[in-house]
Image (spheres, rainbow, N blue to C red):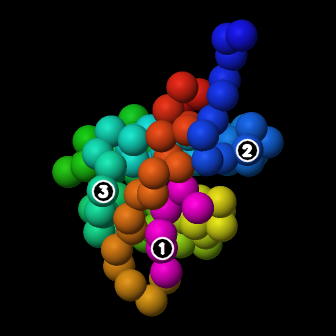
Amino acid sequence: MGGYDPNELSKSAAYTILADDRRRILVGILLEDQGEWEVAELTAEYVARTRDTAVDRLTDEMTRRGRIELEHVHLPRLNDHGVISYSHRQPLIVTENSIADLEPLV
């Protein structure tokens, strides 16, 4: 039978993760380039996409607000669900295999 059939994430977790528009954008970025991301690099890409602008047009204030949003809302949520490995003590984000379960939904 067809339909969405995740390997590692529950359907409920996948839908919860992707219920937020901005987190869906973030997951899309992480799916495009799986592996390791510096927080600053991911922040710039995330803010540019959520504001529909180029990275080089971002202001310091835009970047600061975007980083706060990532570090306090979206990255912890993705980490809690095992989609990424992240600790606010280290500026590195690593995608986990379970992120592939989100690809059909993004």
Q: Determine if residue 70 is in view.
A: no
Q: Which residue is drawn at 61% across and 47% down?
A: 8
Q: Which amino acid lies under the numbered mark 2 shown in the image of this protein?
A: Ser
Q: Given the current orientation, which residue lies at the most extreme bottom position?
A: 89
Q: Which of marks 2 and 1 is in front?
A: 2
Spatial CA distance of label 3 from label 1 is 12 Å
Measured from the top left, where is residue 19 in percent x and y? 72, 39
Q: In which quarter of the image is residue 105?
A: top right
Q: What stretch is highlighted in magenta?
A: 82-87
* Res. 86 mark: 1
Q: Which of 12 and 88 is in front in this view?
A: 12
* Res. 35 mark: 3
Mark 2 neighbour density, 10 Å: few (under 14) some (14–19) many (20 or more): few
Asked whether the residues under the numbered discs 2 and 3 touch, taking CB atoms below 8 Å apart as contact, a structural biologist would say: no
Measured from the top left, where is residue 100 in percent x and y? 48, 40
For label 2, the residue is 10
Q: Given the current orientation, which residue lies at the most extreme right position?
A: 12
Measured from the top left, where is residue 13 in percent x and y? 73, 47
Of labels 3 and 1, earlier in sequence is 3
- Is residue 42 depicted above or below 7 in this figure? below
Locate the C terminus and report the quarter of the image it occupies: top right
Asked whether residue 55 is drawn in magenta, I would say no
Q: Given the current orientation, which residue lies at the most extreme top position?
A: 1
| Secondary-structure class at tag 3 | loop
| In-image side of 92 versus 79 (left or right) | left
| Secondary-structure class at tag 2 | loop
Measured from the top left, where is residue 20 in percent x and y? 68, 43
